[in-house]
Image (tube, helix red, strand yellow):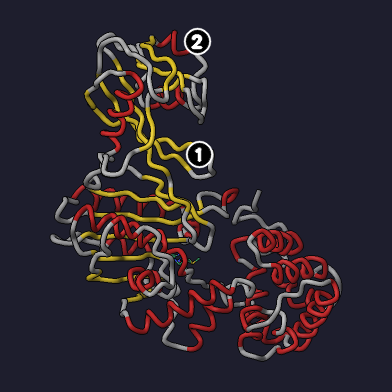
Amino acid sequence: MGLSREERPGLGALFGDMSESCARLDAPTYALLADHVREQVDRPGPLAELLRPYAQAPVADMVPLRFLGSIHRLVLERRAPELAVYFASVGGTPPASPQAQQQCLAAFDAVVAERADEIADGLTWFPQTNEVGRTEGLVAVLRRVSAAFGLPVRLHEIGTSAGLSLRADALAVDGVVPDTRPEWGELPPIVERVGVDVAPVDITTTEGRLHLTSFIWPDHVHRFERLRGAFEVAARVPADVLRADAVEHVRGLRLEQGSALVLWHSAMWMYLTAEQRSEISALCARLGAEATVEAPFIHVALEPVDVSERHVFRLQVTTWPSLPGTDIPAGVEMLWGTSPPSGTPVDWSVPCAGAITHDTDGRLLVVRRGQEPAKGTWSIPGGRVEPGESFAQAASREMQEETGLIGEVVGFAGVVERAAPDGSTYVIADYLLRADGSPVAADDADEARWVTRSELMSLSTSPGLVEALAQWGALPR
Ligand SMILES: C[S@@+](CC[C@H](N)C(=O)[O-])C[C@H]1O[C@@H](n2cnc3c(N)ncnc32)[C@H](O)[C@@H]1O
């Protein structure tokens, strides 16, 4: 369980938490150093002295990252050679043996003592990163959007940092980030690339590049390589990076005929207040209300959902109007995948559909599942969306396969997510259908029947089914 952003748990807890995160995310050198700071921070000495002004800092101030980042910067600038031999970011070897770890910590303590003034300076800078791997999901979304609407894209980003993600297409073509869904269609021409940030980083300067690089954990060599690759791409592909507030920028967005407006953001939502978030959401809905197939609006976000799940980022996509070929209504947010904080690899969701079918008496069609997940429980007919099918078509087909009945889709109910046995996520769009007749179980179902509300309540149903039906006003009579 992580700490919330407003908490002020003390420096020992903050560095302890960072050490755990680093250990979990394959950064052993930083895990070692953060744990060492945790131990030392309450003992008299240069380290405690340096950090004293931050004793009551909230989690949101990211003191551990600032502190280690300022030391990493000294390493990158070749001003801490005794420590550099352990930092993979400059070709060093992470200390594995207890002896190497002792030597690394001794070198670290020496740098802290000798360079206290520079580190104190570094502590005042707010961490800034631009995680290029996060565009893997965006690239795939751009392919789908382009194939579906057949329009060039105007790409806008809030919280853009250095604006590297605005070059998503070129990053994929150059192999800087994996291009995992080429089968989804051609990359669109991107006719406008605009990013805003309250503290944009200028990567045309050494200072800007160093600033971004220093906040990458030194063990994560792949992240350095991606960042370097992105610097090269950015030098070739221009983008407008402006100093502005996210809300202000979204307020000024307008649709244009003949292009799709894609609003993208990653790892920035947590910096907004509740008011700013709801204003952006309302502005998106307003733009969406004006969108058409000739001027669609697509909101793409890659954000950690809450603090307890901060190592899982969700790639969520909302389109206005409905993305052609899907039958997902406009404005419905869909989880397309999840990723680690670095954005790659994306674990793509499995699109599924369910059929909430009522007969003329208002009874509900249910099947007993013959397959996992939830084998043996009663549920509505449903299953995976096949290539080339819309979600609504999949719902009808699944119902026919599992019960022999042919139904008519009369509406959309909603979306639920369920854990798939392989660790990915089933994203299930449920549709309302009408049908009559006697069901005959087949395929994934080993029994099928019509039930009244009281009959449904007496069955062992799949987790969350009754709650979802109740929420959508779709319980049987
Ligand atoms: C963790 S960084 C993520 C940068 C980039 N989106 C990425 O994923 O690599 C968050 C960025 O959001 C910016 N930011 C925070 N609040 C903002 C706001 N109200 N308007 C614009 N940018 C904001 C910060 O300055 C920072 O550059």
Among numbered discs 2 and 1, the one appearing first in the sequence:
1
Q: Is residue 355 above or below residue 6?
A: above
**Which residue: 38% across, 12% down?**
449
Q: Which residue is mark 2?
A: 458
Identify the mark at residue 420; answer none if there is no mark: 1
Query: How far from the left and from the top, in percent, is residue 325?
Result: 23, 44
**As drawn, 226 above or below 158:** below
Position of 395 with respect to 40 (left or right) is: left
- Residue 329 appears at what percent x and percent y? 26, 40
Residue at x 61% of width, y 77% of height: 124
Q: How many marks?
A: 2
Query: Which quarter of the figure is the C terminus placed in?
Result: top left
Q: Is residue 396 left or right of residue 61?
A: left
Question: Where does the image place residue 460, in percent across and percent down from the top left?
Answer: 52, 16
Percent from the top left, x then y, of residue 476? Answer: 36, 14
Residue in front for this viewpoint, 41 or 226: 226
Q: Closer to the camera: disc 2 or disc 1? A: 1
Amino acid carrying mark 2 in the image: Ser
Q: Nearer the viewer, residue 417 or 211?
A: 417
Task: Tell me how far mark 2 sits from mark 1, CA to CA.
Answer: 26 Å
Horizontally, residue 229 falls left or right of residue 55, namely: left
| Whether label 2 touches label 1, CB < 8 Å | no
Image quarter for residue 111?
Answer: bottom right
Above or below, 163 relative to 293? below
Q: Who is closer to the viewer here, 207 or 102?
A: 102
Q: Is residue 339 above or below residue 108?
A: above
State the residue in front, 83 or 50: 83
Secondary-structure class at tag 1:
loop
